[in-house]
Each structure stands twice: as structure tokens, then as C-alpha cells.
Amino acid sequence: MDEVGFDSSAAVDGGESFEAVVVGGGPGGAAAAAVLAENGVETLVLERGVEAGSKNVSGGLLYAEESAPYTLDGLFPGFRDEATERPVTRNYMDNLADGKVHTVDLGGVHHHDTEWCDSVLRRPMDSWVAERVHERTVEAGGGLLTGVRVNGLLREGGEIVGVTCDELDPIRADLIVAADGVNSELARDAGLMDWDEPEEWFQGVKAVVDVPPEEVNDRFGIDDDEGVARLFAGDLFEGVRGGGFLYTNRDSLSIGTVFHLDSLAAERAEPQELLDALLTHPHLGQWLPDEYDEYDEREYSAKLVPDSKKVAHPSPHEGRLLLVGDAAGQMQAQGPIIKGMNHAVSAGGLAAEAYIEARNRRQPESAGERYERRLHDSGLYGKLRPRRYEALGRFGEREVVADAVDDLAGSRLGRLGVRIAGGVVERAFNSPFLLGALPDTRTAYATVPRVLAEELGEPVRGDNDADPPSLEERIGDLTYDTDVGNPHIELMDNSFEASGTAVTACPVSAEGFGGGCYREETVRANGDEERVVSLDTQPCVECGTCAVVADTEWTHPRGGKGVDFRQG
């Protein structure tokens, strides 16, 4: 990025102060910085990657809701023409089982409260937005710096007064916006988020597959200004709670899986194998390159995703620190609809609004409370943590209730009900109200989709010639700047009991694979054998999975180091 007009060494050496510091150059940070700068607030944006987007991964669909207080095209004119992939005009859910498929049109819920929805790739999108953010913040006396890792909060007398960095002296600020993602070190430093419970997280794994634009149009029956989203559920994921997705980009497909981390860990399922089960399923053969065109993956990536129903913080602030986006757990996953980036944009704008109002009233210390009030008054928090889920969904997740409902759904009576009233099920999948109360159980993710396919489905026709690369090849195709001598993960307990789950749950590790992050081995000492794990952070994709499922100390690599995503 061209940073002419902002001398970083002169600005921050010696502990310079800025009115606002925004940590993270993704959608939430960009929105906050843009609104702050437009109102004359001296704003410094600090981005850990070599370029905005180089550390970011999404599925990804970017929604712009009619009810949203902020959208990226509203903040940055020309955004959709320059920075997104395709307008997603159709959305379907394919239920798969026993060689059959039953497709549900999700148009009702997809278009509900939707101004527009585009497929995106984070590296090109975020870098385009960051250039505009840099221009605006420079005009207000700040700028955007890349390759800077913010590693903690600066405190004086117990009060948060700024941030500390690996590459720069401490920076003081009246406002700190933490938009540093799902693995936010600032949120954890403030005690606002933790990594304690696997059931509070999803893990997403994605491959970007090269397909020429004309082939995308032909295979999906669309024009250049159209796009398709397809979700996949049923029996193809070995009972792990979650599903798959496919989104059309301009000249590629984003294909991936999203699973509840607790289920992935409990089943000892390996993410790359579940992804390959989707990529090689006969149903996907109609959209992937055929025997005459070589299957080519541009990039393999992974990330953790917060389940907002359980972790969206009702009061995401502490002193001068305000959390936005994934750092605050603001990722909506309710049934087949997943929204996160759009909520981060709204939260970033609302955080900036709150500070500006607090400053104008000469009460800057009230910014956090004003931000919290805006989250609730705007309806954003209610979308993230619906009251109906608290009342009904959590009840449905009790083991005895979940087992009984699942048994009923798969019984002869349940199957009869599906045959008689299959349309009712389809309408339920298109009801935002019902989806907001849906419990996270295997019934919705696996049993009902399987029954729909078995009872109402048509035979899957066609072949799939896709030959996905091995895990070793996928790791080898990624770009890394390894921080030799400075590992960002420390294994605290190498016993298999404490950390062995990371061998299977880590997206770049696997049983019997010697090239991943976590590896299992049997060691002999004093005549006894012990199963232990070892760690190599070099192939790490920085998703944070091991921080949840293994006994580790986890931080981000230093600025610009580690994996460098080109698609995202």
C-alpha cells in the first residue's frame, strides 16, 4: 500500500499519542476508522498483516441489510464494482443421503431484510478498502500502518490508556477500537473474551477452486451479474454437526465446511478429510472442472468463528477499549444463514458514532456505554443473541431433549410426516423467526436433511473427477514468512490427554501425518510407553483451533510474519 503522506517512524517513535487507535484493517476496523476520520478524529489504524486482508479468511458472503445502520458501499462509493466478486442472487440448500439429493430454495430467508449480498475474497476486498481508509485517516492526521502486531493494552494506574506493539513503542489514545478478529488478544487482555469452551466456536475450512468466468456462468446457468450460493447437509460429514458451502466468485468457487468445534473434536474428525468428502461428492461434479480441465486449488485456509448466540458480548467495552466484529463475538449463525462481516461494519460505525457523541459532550469516558446502548437500540445485538434462542434453543440442546427429538425425526412417524408435509420443512428453513430459535443439535444439521433426502430426494446423477491436493501439497502451496526463533504457540502439556485433540482438529495436522503443526508419537522412558504430541508452528494457518482444544499458550505471530493469504 502506498503510504505517502504518513511518516510512521516520526509519528509513533517515542510513544506518540493519537486520539483514536483502531486495531485491525478488516471490515469492522475500516468502518470505525472511516466514520472517525470523516468527523475529524485523528485516527491511526494498525494492521498485523503485510497488507489488509492477508490475515483474513471468510466463507464468504457479505450481506448488506436494509435495517443496518452502516454498509460498506455506503461508506466507500464504488465498493461493489471494485472490491466484491458477484451479486449472489440465488441460495439453495442441498440435502444429501443415500445417493439422493433434495434441494430447498432458501430465497425467502436469503432475501429477508437484504439490500444486497455479494460473494467476496478477503485479500482483494480488504486491501481495496484499506487504501480508502488510509487516504481518509491521513487527512485527519493519522494513517494506516501494516506489519504491526498490537500485543496488549497499555495501562496506567489500572486504567487502559493505549496499546503496546511488537514493532513500535507504546501508543496512547483516548479511544481504542479492537477489530483484531476472532483471536483478539486485546479482548482477552481486557478479560472480555476467552477460549474456554469448544461448544462456543465453529471451525471453517475452505478451498478456492479455479474456474474460468465463462465456465462459472455456464455451469450455474447465470450471467456475469449473478451468483449462486449452495449449502450442503446430510450424511456426508460422518455425524459431525455442521455442513458445507459453495459460493460463486468471478473466476473461482469458494467451497468449504463449517462445523461446531466441540463436535469436530469429539468425533476426532479431520477437517481436510471432511472438506475432501464434499469436494469429491458426485453431486458437486456438475460444477467443478471435469476430466478435460485440471482441478486446481488456488488456496486452502481455515479460521475459527464465534457462535454469537452463545458468546456475543452484551457489553463489549472496558474503559477506552471498544470491541467490534469477531473480537466481540458478533457473528450470526442461525440455521443456513451465516452473517458476520456486515455486523462488524455496523458495529464499527456505531462504535465511532458513540465516541464522537461522547467527545462532543465532553464525556469521552462514556463512549463504551453509548456504544453498548447503540448495539441494543439498533437491533444488532438482538440479531446476534435472539431471546427466542435463549428461551427455546438452549432447552432443545439438553441431551435428553436433543436425543428424543432426533429419534422422533428419524423414526417411521417422523419420516411419514416429512413425506406428508415436506413443504412445511422448507418453509421452516426460510423463517428467520424459527431459525433464531433453532437449537444446535444433530437433528437440524444431519438428521432432518438426511430424512428429507431419503424420503423426498432424487438420485444424484453424474460423476466428479475432482482430485484435491494432499494436505502436504496444500500447506506447500501457501505463502509463509516464518518467524524463525519466535514461535507464537507454546505447548504447555504435551501429553495426548491434554493436547492430543489438536492432532485431528487442527486444519493442517492429521493422524499419521508428519508435516503438520501437531504430531502424535509414542515415546519410551524407564520401560514405560507414553503417547505425546509435538508442535511445529511453521505450517500454522493461525486459526486458533489449538488454543481451544489443546493445552497451549497462543498469540499471533509478529507483524507481517506467518501465513500470508492471497485469496482469504
Image (cartoon, helix red, strand yellow):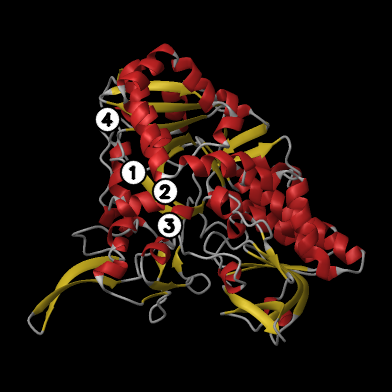
Percent x, y of residue 132: 71, 55
Q: Which residue is mark 4?
A: 464
Give the class, few, some or many, for how many residues have Cα within 10 Å of label 2's Cα (few <14, many ≥20): many
Marks 4 and 1, how far apart in space?
A: 23 Å
Callout 3, which amino acid? Answer: Pro
Secondary structure of the residue carrying tag 3 is helix
Query: How far is mark 3 from mark 4, CA to CA?
Result: 34 Å
Q: Nearer the N terminus, badge 2 or badge 1?
A: 1
- Marks 3 and 2: in contact by CB < 8 Å? yes
As displayed, is residue 115 above or below residue 563? above
365 or 177, which lies in front? 365
Residue at screen point 28% across, 43% down: 468
- Residue that mark 2 sits on: 260
**Inter-mark Cα distance, 2 to 4:** 27 Å
Q: Is residue 174 visible?
A: yes
Q: Which residue is mark 3?
A: 198
Reading the image, the residue beneath label 1 is 240
Q: Is residue 267 left or right of residue 52?
A: left
Tag 2 and tag 4, C-beta contact below 8 Å: no
Residue 39, given in percent of the width and then of the height, sits at: 85, 59
- From what the image shows, is residue 197 above or below residue 288? below
Q: Is residue 225 visible?
A: no
Which residue appears at 61% of the width and 46% of the height?
A: 385
> Which mark lies nearer to you, 4 or 1?
1
Q: CA distance from mark 2 to mark 1?
A: 8 Å
Question: Sequence order check: which comes first, mark 2 or mark 3?
Answer: 3
